[in-house]
Amino acid sequence: MLNIPSEFGRQTVGFVTVTDTGTPGYLGVTEQTRTVVALSGVRFRPLSTEETSGLTSELKGLTTIAGEVWKLTAPAAAASLAAQSTGEIVYDGTTNPVWDDDDNSNVFQIDGFNQPKPGIFGGVHHVTILCLRQKS
């Protein structure tokens, strides 16, 4: 029998869903609420030099002092399958990552769509997501 892992690492990230709420105010801007769902058993890391060489020129430009591209490999859970480009990932090295209004150094913007990877017996085995981290 094959031993197929259900975990890809020992890290925990928070999938953040950003929702516009309320009536548009000045210049049509609405208030945003954030909901965080933690997912354990992931591997979250900056892309290596070899991996960044295959990126489009737009993403290569973000891998600078001001920004980094990170790669998330996660089990095929509801949170990872529902991740959208309008969402965010929170990672702070703890088992309960928290989104903080005052400090966004642990916030990563999801870039593009999640990439479900098929399993050998059908279904989805895991999900890969690329994220951008902007440093200030």
Image (tube, rainbow, N blue to C red):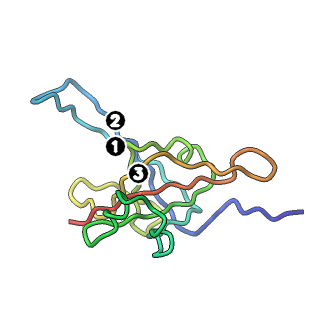
Quarter-of-image position of residue 98: bottom left
Residue density around tag 1, few if under 14, some if 14–19, many if 20 or more, within 10 Å: few
Give residue 34's mark: 1
Q: What residue type is labelled 1?
A: Arg
Q: Which of marks 3 and 2 is in front?
A: 3
- Which of the image's four quarters has the N terminus? bottom right
Image location (x, y in percent) of residue 40: 56, 60
The disc label shown at residue 110, or none: 3
For the residue marked with disc 2, what is the amino acid? Answer: Thr
For disc 2, the marked residue is 19
Which mark is on residue 107? none
Which circle's residue, 1 or 2, is located before the other in the chain? 2
Image: 11 above or below 124: below
Across the whole image, how many numbered discs are drawn on residues? 3
Q: Which of 11 and 55 lies nearest the eye of the viewer?
A: 55
Q: Where is residue 66 in the image (x, y as percent from the top left)?
A: 25, 68
Residue 84 image point, x, y percent: 45, 42
Lower sequence index among marks 3 and 1:
1
- Dot 3 or dot 2: first in sequence order is 2
* Rendered view: 42 above or below 124: below
Q: Which mark's residue is nearer the viewer, 3 or 1?
A: 3
